[in-house]
Amino acid sequence: MGQYRDIVENGLWKQNPGTMQLLGLCPTLAVTSTAVNGLSLGLATALVMAASNAAVAPVRRYVPDEIRIPVFILVIAALVTIIDLSMNAFVHPLYVVLGIFIPLIVTNCIVLARVEAFAAKNPVTPSALDGLMMGLGLTLVLTLLGAVREFVGKGTALSGIDLVFGAEAKAWVLQLIPDYPGFLLAILPPGAFIGLGLLIATHNWLEQRRLAKASMHAALPVAQSH
Amino acid sequence: MSRSPYLSSAPSVSVIMLKVLLALLPGIAAYVWVYGGGILISLALASLTALLAEAAVLRLRQRPVLPFLMDGSAIVTAWLLALALPPLAPWWLVVVGTLFAIVVAKQLYGGLGYNPFNPAMIGYAALLISFPVLMTQWPSPLALAKVSLSFADQWHYIFTRSLPLNVPVDAISSATPLDYLKTQLVLQQSVSDIRNTPIFGWLGGRGSELVALATLLGGLYLLHQRIISWHIPLAFLATLTLLSAAFHLLAPELHASPQFHLFSGGAMLCAFFIATDPVSGPTTPLAKLVFAAGIGVLTYVIRVFGGYPDGIAFAVILMNICVPLLDAYTQPRVFGHEK
């Protein structure tokens, strides 16, 4: 079970695609103007990643090394097309907002990176879990970044929720700061870069604190033995 | 009697910054004369915010707080930003802009000496793209305003956004000359007709040209004190003059005169105080010339063909990006070494 724990930990924290590997930056920067957008595209990507990892792992021994990348891309493209068509059918307003970024999941390097780095070398179950966890790790970053940009930029939470749950959900949008003049910079692309930079800094800071704490605990028995 | 070696020591950072602040005083005095005392409130607000923000970040970064605060660089950034903002901007606009300049553009990059971009201009640009309406709402010079506000009225306007009874916002604000010129040109007016309106003076905008002249005076003091070298101001002003003169001679009814471009907007402030920032600017003389000429070209292009009334901030930031390249390509040959 240790292996699965590592996979979960790597995907969500240690090798988080958004803040540590810095892969999949295109959607991270482009669609995170609200938390809902970030969450939706993140979940779509996670679904594609879990499915593509699960699909590539069983055929990994039969794909010739020389043409593995085109084959992987074809598999990913087929899965993305399924997601693309389903979102168009079931959550059409959201599909319109996310637009080109759903088909662009094909070119999202984190998807191919996990297929190539993990699924091409591991059995089906861990591969699927790795894809899912990496995808969820990315989703976490996308949602957080979207929430921060939305809050700073518009002073709201959950705006755009009606795109997912229909027009009556518009009442769920929270105006957290009344009479907020809006800080357009956070919504515009520079806000995405600055926000991501701050998230990465936060991640590094928390990780450093964790390591410092761990090494202090490790050092403690030595100090006592003196 | 001093003994050899007779090496003159370079002035310390705080001396340089103090002289820069001193050189800004004539411009500020002209500002108060033309627009009223409101600018002093902005300057105080910006300085206070800058010092508090700088101290807070230095504490977080576990750097010594007092020595860095005393170098005065934060105050210079604060003053430059306050002078670039519309004089009666709401208090929070000044605070947000200064916070952005000091925390994001300066300290996050490593503090004084490490910031690749001019902090004041980053603060200005962040405000301009976030609050375009507020940032283009300039008060009329007192001489032209239908209603003149007292200092207390300006204070109230800055902090509460409320005006004395019966005074509509339109009575105290007007388009800047650069802005007015742009919109009227779109309406097919000729430059000579536009310049006959009362907001224009004999050089640039009525009133604002005085501020520009006073800023020029302060800039000459900096040159005389050798705080800045002549390369950047001269190259910037010369490029702006040449470009605007060329366009003006080709089509005098479509393009404003060179003296209008020199004495409007932030050109003078940019030439002597903003582009000459020693941290975000280049170091070799040739690079300085290219850098400043680039700012001149970009400023003119943004003013005349772009969507914003003035282009100083974006021009400076864009040329800041080129600084490492410019410096790398213009290193002088060391004596005795092959090229």
Image (cartoon, coloured by chain):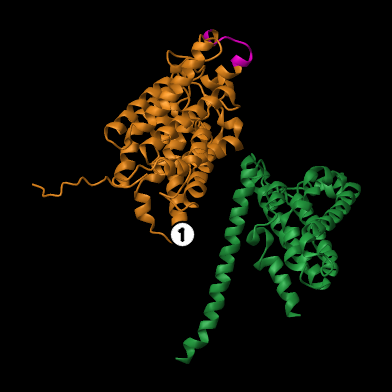
Q: Which residues are magenta?
A: B184-192
Q: Name the residue located 40 percent from the left edge and 28 percent from the top edge.
A: B235
* Residue B188 colored in magenta in the image: yes
Q: Is residue B46 above or below residue A131?
A: above
**Chain B: what color?**
orange
Position of the C terminus of chain B, as image quadrant, is top left
Q: Is residue B103 above or below residue A121?
A: above
Q: Chain of mark 1?
A: B
Element marked by disc 1: loop
Q: Nearer the viewer, residue B136 or A64?
A: A64
Spot occupied by residue B316 in the image (x, y as percentages of width and height): 48, 35
Q: Nearer the viewer, residue B13 or A180?
A: B13
Q: Which residue is mark 1?
A: B61
Q: How many marks?
A: 1
The residue sitting at the bottom extreme is A225
Spot occupied by residue B120 in the image (x, y as percentages of width and height): 47, 40
Q: Is residue B2 above or below residue B290?
A: below
Q: Which chain identifier belongs to the green chain?
A: A
Residue B277 shown left or right of residue A115 in the figure: left
**Residue type, label 1:** Arg
Q: Residues within 10 Å of mark 1 (few under 14, many from 20)?
A: some
Residue A68 shown left or right of residue B30 in the figure: right
Rendered image quadrant of residue B293: top left
